[in-house]
Amino acid sequence: MPRPLVGVGHSYGSNVLVNLSLIHPRLLSTLVLMDPVIQPKAPAPQGPSPTQASTFRRDLWPSRAEAEISMRKSPFYKSWDPRVLDRWLEYGIRETPTALYPNEKGAATLTTTKHQECFIFLRPSWEAVSEEGHIEKRDLVPDMDPASFDRFPFYRPEPPNTLRRLPEVRPSVLYIFGGDSPMSTPEARQLKMELTGTGVGGSGGAKLGMVKEVVLEGVGHLVAMEDSEQCADAGAAWLGRQLKHYEAEQRTYLEWAKRSLAEKQTMSKEWEKRIGGPIVRPSKPKL
């Protein structure tokens, strides 16, 4: 893959990209993270939530046409950019039969099943944790924080676990937050800006211009779907600056690459100078 590589993610996808950059700090040159799910607490395991709604959402229609009509009428999609909704209807719906509906021919269902969607939102913990919240089978939940408030009957370790490691993020980061998003309250935004890239191995953070935030007012968590133009404009402006930074790094590398193989593999005169020169051993006293 030609470099530079840029990671662009939304919601939980942003969390995944941050973890990729932690695994391989120099793989991605910069990150564009749209309303990331990186926070002190994971989504609530019970009560009204996107997971509960998706668990019981409709996922089978008599035909693709009826599925499209149903979704265009849904209040959930009313705030989306029409172009985004068109793409969603094109690729987010598929015809049956499928593994889940092997006997339904000519009907329509979701390309990504509601089951896979919910497995992303939350992970079951009821076999490992008691109703009182005590971890009883740690081998089933090795990544669960014992100090977490929400442990039963579901959990999701990545939001708080990734938050703790934001100081280590090496690539530069542009955050695009939804001003009305419950994931991106002013306090949550400030915390990310204060942490990202500021630790050992990190980029240097906002103070060095390596982390920036853009807040889209009047937009919710689905920033990329609701205001794709502002997301694109902010991302393009950021990438323009980051490409200049990458080009400067490349010039430095290419200067080094011009050296001979022997020069690359041997210590320089500067090294010998900085190390303090040869060790001077005291002469043996004469008897």
Image: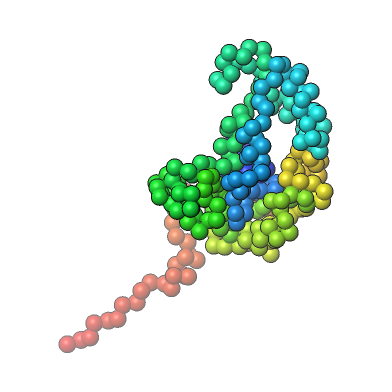
Q: What residue lies at 68% left-to-right and 19% top-to-bottom?
A: 108
Q: Nearer the viewer, residue 94 or 107?
A: 107
Q: Position of residue 228 (x, y in %)?
A: 78, 40
Q: Nearer the viewer, residue 216 or 119?
A: 119
Q: Position of residue 256 (x, y in %)?
A: 56, 52
Residue 67 against residue 124 in the figure, above or below: above
- Please state if 194 lies on the left or on the right of 72 as rendered: left
Q: What residue lies at 38% left-to-right and 72% top-to-bottom?
A: 278
Q: Quadrant of residue 119?
A: top right
Mark yes or no: residue 27 visible: no
Q: Quadrant of the C terminus?
A: bottom left
Residue 199 against residue 141 in the figure, above or below: below
Give the colouring mode of the picture. rainbow
Q: What residue lies at 57% left-to-right and 62% top-to-bottom?
A: 199
Residue 180 against residue 271 in the figure, above or below: above
Q: Position of residue 164 (x, y in %)?
A: 56, 58
Mark yes or no: residue 278 visible: yes
* Residue reaching furthest to the front: 131
- Please state if 224 lies on the left or on the right of 101 as rendered: right
Q: Nearer the viewer, residue 126 or 186?
A: 126
Q: Quadrant of the N terminus?
A: top right
Q: What residue lies at 67% left-to-right and 27% top-to-bottom?
A: 58
Q: Position of residue 167 (x, y in %)?
A: 58, 59
